[in-house]
Image: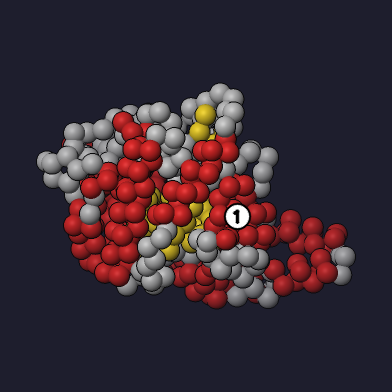
Amino acid sequence: MKNEKIEKAYKVAKEKYAELDIDTDAAIRQMEDAVISLHCWQTDDVGGFEKPDAALGGGGIQVTGNYPGKARNMNDLMQDIEKVMSLLPGKQRLNLHAIYGDFGDKFVDRNEIDAKHYEKWIDWAKKLKTGLDFNPTCFSHPKADEGYTLSSKNEDTRKFWIEHVKRCREIGAVMGKELNTPCINNIWIPDGSKDTAVDRYTNRSLLKKSLDEIFETEYPEEYLKDSVESKLFGIGSESMVVGSYDFYLPYALKNNKLICLDNGHYHPTEQVGDKISACLQFFDEIMLHLTRGVRWDSDHVVVLNDEILHIAQEIIRANSLKRVNIGLDFFDASLNRIGAYVVGTRAAQQAFLISLLEPSDQLKIYENENKYFERLALLEIMKTMPFGAVWDYYCMVNDVPAGIDYIKEIQTYERDILNKR
């Protein structure tokens, strides 16, 4: 899909970047390593396909809006994700929550799920030549209504969720083996207290005990990678979250698990980008969940803001793109859900391409020589470089719409597909 205007603009931009010894072609090639795992739950507002249909709740998850056209079943979801991928440059994977299995008309409780319930997803991923990631679903269930799952003082409840997560790891390992690419199984639980908690120690001891039991079974790393995700607070757990950053960081490090950094799960004044270079000193790999919090962990659609750019810059400046697993985690039902995916994913991709086009070697030289004026000046100059022309060219060579063209594609899909659901 060649476009003479895009090619002409790219030639000018390429020359402009070359003046700073930046190879735009090389940056575009490096984008092959910026594989983004799309979260399936934006398509249907974290509803899933359990029977009978479960209402969202029981764990600090809230979706705002009721835009028409959400996915009603697995076929709708697959169709939507394929459309999203057709509008994105680069490579993507799909990240599934356990509630999105192929359960038919039968109710299958969370502690009974099996790899057979995800065979259709594996076949779909094979067709698309992509990978799958996985997540236990420890919310929106009667056994999560009390606010505690893996850290519950109710032994029956705790054992139920242990079995669920064990089965999720087994399913993830099957996905990784079948698709010949490791599946990341990311564990997040909503456990916590709305008001002041007294016995935090026991809940955290129980969480550790549960995780130790869950991880007793080992799977080859080429099939499965385990990740644990912390949170500062949630709806219904404002005063104490059992799985805090201070809990999961040492647990992951001690037990050789990935730590998941979700930039919506920290205090608004914390910079997740700053955590990356620290964690990479001790972890071979880390997991990212990219989102946009507006005053709190509100999971708005990712945009190209300073926070997302800082995260991408820290990864590229550390030459660690291959050590960071990139996933998205937002759910907004107030706008076209396909558009939310494309805007959010493209924003993340743009942040990484901008970072790859940075003269990091020269910036480091200035920094090491205490030339802070020069460092600041060059960083400011980079803000006016013709990045848009490089991005459009990247889209063109990947045969996806550049500029505003993808908006019409999504509007057509809404008219022809979404509005008929």
Q: Position of residue 43 (x, y in %)?
A: 31, 43
Quarter of the figure with the N terminus: bottom left
- Occupied quadrant, residue 280: bottom right
Q: Examine the rendered structure and indicate whether residue 213 appears above or below residue 420.
A: below
Q: Which quadrant does the C terminus fall into?
A: top left
Residue positioned most to the right: 370
Residue at figure coordinates x 34%, y 54% from the top left: 166
Taking 125 as reference, is 206 left or right? right
In the image: residue 277, left or right of residue 133: right
Establish if 333 lies above or below 318: above
Give the secondary structure at mark 1. helix
Q: Quadrant of residue 286?
A: bottom right
Q: Farthest residue toward the top?
A: 195
Residue under the point 73% across and 59% down: 379
Residue type at mark 1 is Pro
Is residue 371 in view? yes
Identify which residue is drawn at 44% across, 35% down: 153
- Residue 118 shown left or right of residue 361 in the figure: left
Badge 1 crowding class, 10 Å Cα cut-off, few under 14, some 14 to 19, many 20 or more, is few
Nearer to the camera, 175 or 415: 175
Q: Residue at x 57, y 28 (%)?
A: 197
Residue 72, x across and y down, in percent: 21, 39
The x, y position of residue 135, in whole percent, is 37, 51
Disc 1 marks which residue?
A: 250
Q: Where is residue 416 in the image (x, y as percent from the top left)?
A: 20, 43
What colouring method underlies this structural image? secondary structure
Q: Can residue 417 be seen in this view?
A: no
From the viewer's side, name the closer residue of 111 and 382: 111
